[in-house]
């Protein structure tokens, strides 16, 4: 097992190497200046002189307007020849494989690969390693390792308590994730380190190839002490690890105050965009039939809506909804019911979804909405047509084409403040490749239900949803003013999502009312 430390400067890289790290990972700035490349080259030379590994981390999505500059950055990265580029953007992943096939790629943690279909997809994309940055249990990791030999890197302690691949906080609100989710710096450093060591003890038996540590969480001398504890745990034999953990617990109880984190900077003011305070649908809005899909809060509401609503209805694929649907499947036309896959399918729950998708496919139900790439791979394996949600991270035309090749028929328009923000992308992309929400409360962050969550920032709220807690806005994203413009740009369908809306149960809202069908001229 290798120990990788993510650093932000040369001093941190030196400290990591002196502490015994097998390599360092450097995160690229959003717009690196020429001097940064020179400094990073010097860090790389120092690392290589000690026969350690040097990784570059580019875990941000690239928008269409940023694409020319991003391609130039890829050229500079290829000239540096790092041991691997840890990448997130699908379009850049495809571009690296075409232009720089010799450059090793690792999937960043916010790709959201957390089940075996996702890991097989990562291998298809050309990744030689995957960073796991999700709240996975040891049970799920053990099941995952049995199904895949893909080299895995675990982040300990994690950067966030939630699923990194499902976070939309920055795009929707323009604020860092740590301003909404509970950052680990707010916890006692000794307690966080002890939890990481206990997790590491289990990972040693799972065949995980590497562990990544945040250099900024343990600055200065405390980094060397922390890495010493990591090494003591993984070098111990399985029978000796409980004794090593007990000793580490005593050390942290006595000297835990020495493991201090960096002084927390004052965060910028939280000013989330609230949107309309209480938007009410306008009865004058008229859209053609088939353009608007309704998302129901569950199967019972979907069945009630279907009595009057003749266009497609979207519901989540859960054991409860699936069990309620099966006895009544004959009353449905397959084209009228679309199933939304969960945003995070753990390996232990995979068999249910595989069987359910196969049964639905045999019944003619072959349209699915997927919010992560593991779900895309699962739906495509069942022969389904996939509509990709915002959390897939498709933000440029290169990514759009790569998504099409992976079987995604349409992708949801990304978060935007104004419809004009979409115009450059809609102009550059082929027509008919997008769908959008017309009215919904988006999940900005998703965390396990058991996670200790802070009070929500102004304008936001935490909502319990099964085994997860979701961070949502108090007011909806409402695109009524663009409802007639979007279809003219080839954006369809438009989804009106009822979950968390507070709108009347079992009734289609006025803004979703379709217009009359156009009669065909007689010959």
Image (tube, grey):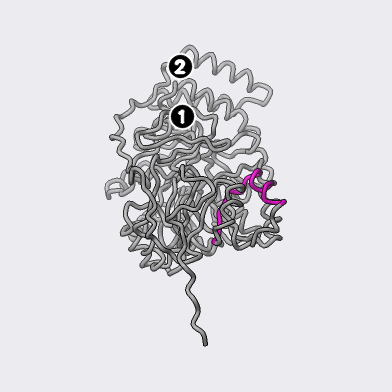
Residue 448, compared with residue 404, is above or below; it is above
Q: Can residue 73 be seen in this view?
A: yes
Q: Label for residue 453?
A: 1
- Residue 290, position as x, y percentages in the image: 51, 65
In the rendered image, residue 16, in percent from the top left (x then y), is placed at 43, 32
Looking at the image, which residue is at 36% across and 67% down?
A: 427
Q: Give the range drawn in magenta.
A: 311-327
Q: Is residue 367 above or below residue 265?
A: below
Q: Where is residue 126 in the image (x, y as percent from the top left)?
A: 54, 56
In percent of the image, x 66 and y 48: which residue is there?
A: 322
Q: For numbered disc 2, what is the local secondary structure?
A: helix
**Dot placed on the residue nearer the N-terminal end, 2 or 1:** 2
Left or right: 172, with 446 as reference point: left
Q: Do the residues labelled 2 and 1 touch (CB within 8 Å)?
A: no
Q: Residue at x 31, y 48 (%)?
A: 32
Q: Is 110 placed above or below 221 here?
A: below
Q: Is residue 326 magenta?
A: yes
Image quadrant containing the N terminus? top right
Q: Name the residue under label 2.
A: 256
Furthest-bottom residue in view? Answer: 523
Q: Where is residue 438 in the image (x, y as percent from the top left)?
A: 42, 55
């Amino acid at each position: 097992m290798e120990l990788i430390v993510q650093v932000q400067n040369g001093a941190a890289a030196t400290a990591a190497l002196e502490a015994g790290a097998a390599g360092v990972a450097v995160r690229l700035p959003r717009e690196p200046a020429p001097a940064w490349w020179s400094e990073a080259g010097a860090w790389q030379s120092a690392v290589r002189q000690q026969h350690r590994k040097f990784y570059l981390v580019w875990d941000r999505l690239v928008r269409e307007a940023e694409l020319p500059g991003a391609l130039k950055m890829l050229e500079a990265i290829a000239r540096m020849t790092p041991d691997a580029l840890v990448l997130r953007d699908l379009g850049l992943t495809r571009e690296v494989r075409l232009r720089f096939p010799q450059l090793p790629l690792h999937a960043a943690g916010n790709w959201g690969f957390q089940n075996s279909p996702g890991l097989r997809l990562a291998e298809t994309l050309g990744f030689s390693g995957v960073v796991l940055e999700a709240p996975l249990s040891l049970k799920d990791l053990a099941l995952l390792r049995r199904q895949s030999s893909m080299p895995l890197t675990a982040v300990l302690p994690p950067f966030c308590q939630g699923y990194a691949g499902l976070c939309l906080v920055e795009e929707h609100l323009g604020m860092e994730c740590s301003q909404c989710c509970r950052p680990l710096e707010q916890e006692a450093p000794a307690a966080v380190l002890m939890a990481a060591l206990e997790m590491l003890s289990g990972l040693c038996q799972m065949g995980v190839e590497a562990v990544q540590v945040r250099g900024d969480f343990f600055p200065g001398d405390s980094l060397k002490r922390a890495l010493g504890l990591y090494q003591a745990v993984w070098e111990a034999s399985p029978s000796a690890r409980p004794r090593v953990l007990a000793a580490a617990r005593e050390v942290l109880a006595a000297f835990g105050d020495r493991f201090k984190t960096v002084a927390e900077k004052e965060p910028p003011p939280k000013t989330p965009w609230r949107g309309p305070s209480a938007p009410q649908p306008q009865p004058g809005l008229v859209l053609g039939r088939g353009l608007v899909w309704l998302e129901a809060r569950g199967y019972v509401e979907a069945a009630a809506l279907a009595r009057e609503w003749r266009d497609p209805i979207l519901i989540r694929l859960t054991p409860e909804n699936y069990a309620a649907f099966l006895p009544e499947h004959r009353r449905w036309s397959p084209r009228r019911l679309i199933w939304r896959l969960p945003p995070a399918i753990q390996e232990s729950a995979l068999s249910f979804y595989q069987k359910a998708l196969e049964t639905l496919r045999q019944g003619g139900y072959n349209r699915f909405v997927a919010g992560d790439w593991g779900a895309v791979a699962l739906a495509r394996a069942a022969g389904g047509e996939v509509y990709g949600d915002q959390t897939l991270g498709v933000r440029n035309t290169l990514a759009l084409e790569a998504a099409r090749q992976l079987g995604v028929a349409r992708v949801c328009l990304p978060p935007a403040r104004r419809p004009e923000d979409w115009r450059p992308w809609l102009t550059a992309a082929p027509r008919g490749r997008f769908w959008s929400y017309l009215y919904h409360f988006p999940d900005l962050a998703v965390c396990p239900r058991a996670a200790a969550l802070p009070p929500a920032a102004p304008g936001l709220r935490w909502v319990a949803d099964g085994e997860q807690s979701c961070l949502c806005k108090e007011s909806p994203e409402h695109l009524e003013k663009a409802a007639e413009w979007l279809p003219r740009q080839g954006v369809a369908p438009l989804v009106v999502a009822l979950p968390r809306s507070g709108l009347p149960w079992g009734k289609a809202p006025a803004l979703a009312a379709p217009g009359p069908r156009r009669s065909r001229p007689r010959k």
